[in-house]
Image: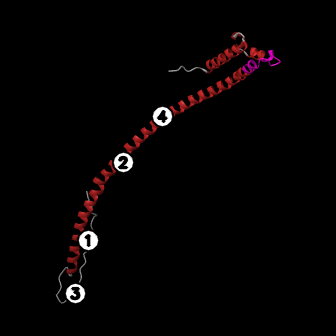
Amino acid sequence: MAAILSSDQGKLLIKGAMVQKVADATGMDTAAIGNETTTKAIVDADPDNDNEDANTIASALYRLSDGTGDVHSGVCAVREGVFKLREGTIEMKDGVIDLVNGAEELNDGTQELLDGVNEYDEEGIQKLKGIIKDDLSEASDTLKAVTDLGKNYTSFGGKREDMEGTCVFIIKADGITMD
């Protein structure tokens, strides 16, 4: 696995390679070439541009040094962005865990509600339905029979058969309650 260099290490590696190229082209000692002052001195040392390769390399080294700073700034910005992305990913993961937990709670609550509705139906609605159906049918039959008897009952004290009559009973009673 390749080692990852810091931006400063990368700058030094590139600058070292360029210094060596300048040293090879100019015959100068590499220790004297590695700074901006020396690089500028190489360019200024040959006013007639007799050593065009050395001037080109020195100029490129100078521009490379400036560009390396831009690369370093960019790498730092990317690194900062990666850290922010990591933090956001962790936050999103925690949010997903909360969402899953909330969905499980919702599912449990929905099941509990369904169980309660089923219990209400079985123990409440169905019992009332049975009571009403049975009692209402019985009460309806009784009411019909009493009505039929009432139509035929025309006298309380008796009457002759050639007479017509009606009989009505009014009874005052307490209300009926069901336990």
Q: Which residue is mark 4?
A: 93
Q: Which residue is mark 2?
A: 113
Closer to the chain start, of discs 4 and 2, is: 4
Range shown magenta: 43-58
Closer to the chain start, of discs 3 and 2, is: 2
Near-viewer residue (38 or 106): 38
Q: Which residue is mark 1?
A: 171
Mark 2 is on which residue type?
Leu
Horizontal arrangement in the rendering, residue 33 relative to residue 131 (left or right): right
The extreme front residue here reads 50
How far apart marks 4 and 3 lie (CA) works out to: 94 Å
Q: How many marks?
A: 4
**Which dot, 1 or 3, sits closer to the camera?**
3
Give the class, few, some or many, for how many residues have Cα within 10 Å of label 3's Cα (few <14, many ≥20).
few
Closer to the chain start, of discs 1 and 3, is: 3
Residue 164 marker: 3
Q: For numbered disc 4, what is the local secondary structure?
A: helix
* Residue 143, image x, y percentages: 24, 71
**Which dot, 4 or 3, sits closer to the camera?**
4
> Residue placed at 26% from the left, 73% from the top?
170
Q: For numbered disc 1, what is the local secondary structure?
A: loop
Q: Up-down: is 179 above or below 161?
A: above
Near-viewer residue (153 or 33): 33
Q: Are marks 4 and 1 in contact (CB under 8 Å)?
A: no
**Which dot, 3 or 2, sits closer to the camera?**
2
The picture quadrant where one finds residue 15 is top right
Horizontal arrangement in the rendering, residue 175 relative to residue 14 (left or right): left
**Which dot, 4 or 1, sits closer to the camera?**
4
Mark 1 is on which residue type?
Ile
> Residue placed at 38% from the left, 44% from the top?
107
Q: Are marks 4 and 3 in contact (CB under 8 Å)?
A: no
Closer to the chain start, of discs 1 and 2, is: 2
